[in-house]
Amino acid sequence: MATRASFPEVASDFRPTLRERTIVHRIGDEAVVWSDLRPEPTLLDPVAAVMLDVIDGLATTAELIDDVQSVLGIDHFAARAQVKRVLNLFDDAGMLASSVPAELLLVELRPLLPEPDW
Amino acid sequence: MQADQQLTLDIGGNRLRVTTSDHDSADFLRRALADHVIEDDALLGFKLALTDPRGLTAHETPTRRDQSGLCVLMDCTGAILARSSDRNVVLAALTGHLAALNLSAPRWPISRYRLRALITSDHAVLVAAPLLTRPPVIERRLAKLGYRVADVPFVDIDAESLMLQPFDIAWPALAKLESGSGHASSRELAQPVTKLLWPARENASNPSPAQVVHAMAAATLSGNHQQRISGAEQLTEKIEVLPVRVGDDAATYRVLQAGHR
């Protein structure tokens, strides 16, 4: 069983990759996307739509944060918050290679048996 | 107290229950839809409620068949679809919603949208929820403005011509019923879509094209994902989107009136 891949803290060496079977329609500076893992489409705001182009499986999140910081002219913490927000948005939309199908999403994964403490 | 009549139907493989406090209507539907009546239970689809001028329900009126009351058609969410003192008008409204269950999925470039529609003599206006639902539509106000609400649960639209697709009623007794003032049957839909009424919050800016495409694609009931977004894009490019403030009871009618000038 799988859990939602959430990004409470953005791991600096994580290399997010977009799922290939996602339909993307750019409209103005926004985009409408639809993953085969989701029953409904998702609307991407302008910042998220721009990040579609830079999430390529090669750039790490640290590099993405630097890119956002320099392109948007905001400080490191604000850039980090944006990257985290967009990665969560992409994951909710089923757009990441690590995203799970909607029917497998769980709120919390509980172990069947507690771990022994020796 | 009179018990509601329950009628369980299987139409096109869709099972639903119609409940009504009006025994005459129940008998009429049972005869008209005899081929679709089943014994099994099913989830509530529609309710026909009778009220009398004193505001009492048919359960509370002293006579079982009070002809002077208001007949109200509601769907399973409680949304009011039609109101009339003539029960045949309400039955006519129910007919389109039932007949739609018999339709198979349309083929591209026609797409099916979970939207309501208003029909005039030369065009159609799409209406996104919760407009026309909360508050319920007032048929006479629509009729004064030259509009009629289409008594169907969804609309099929050709993405290239923008024409709404009409459909026939297969049941002779129900097909004879005439739509009331402010209502249009499924056979009267053949008009081009020119506008979309968009529910807007107070002080919200007009929706962006991407927002409209997203909402329309999500409201599409047929086709693959690519077709749903493409159909929504084609529609959005060609029709006028009119924001209507949610919570302002008269806003819908003001926008429609302004659009007629």
Image (tube, coloured by chain):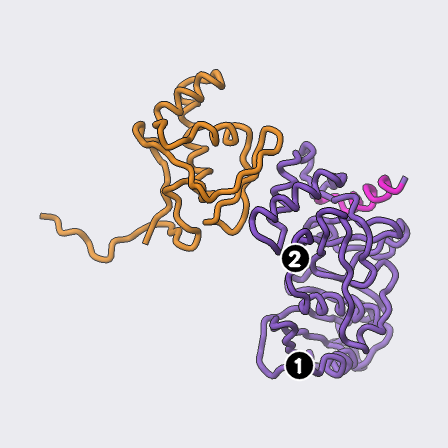
Chain colours: A orange, B purple
Task: Kindly identify which numbered label has been placed on residue A51.
Answer: none
Under mark 1, the amino acid is Val
Nearest the viewer among B154 and B137 is B154
Q: Residues within 10 Å of mark 2 (few under 14, many from 20)?
A: few
Task: Tell me the tag on residue B107.
Answer: 2
Query: At 45% across and 49% down in the image, what residue appears?
Result: A37
Instruction: Tell me if label 2 and label 1 are in contact, CB under 8 Å.
Output: no
Marks 2, 1: nearer the viewer: 2
Residue B37, disc: 1
- Res. B160 visible in picture: yes
Q: Quadrant of the C terminus of chain B?
A: top right
Q: Are marks 2 and 1 on the same chain?
A: yes
Query: What stretch of residues is rendered in magenta?
Result: B246-260
Q: Nearer the viewer, residue B135 or A13?
A: A13
Q: Is residue B257 magenta?
A: yes
Left or right position of B122 against B211: right
Amino acid on which the number 2 mark rests in the picture: Arg
Lower position in the chain sequence, tag 2 or tag 1: 1
Number of numbered discs on residues:
2
Residue B78, given in percent of the width and then of the height, sits at 67, 62
Q: Position of residue B258 (x, y in %)?
A: 86, 39
Task: Please tell me how crowded label 1 is: few (under 14), some (14-19), or many (20+) other residues with Cα within 10 Å.
Answer: some
Choose top left, top right, bottom left or bottom right for residue B60.
bottom right
Image quadrant where residue B200 sits: top right
Eyeballing the image, is B8 above or below A93? Answer: below
Quadrant, the N terminus of chain B: bottom right
In the image, farthest residue toward the left = A118
The answer for which chain carries disc 2 is: B
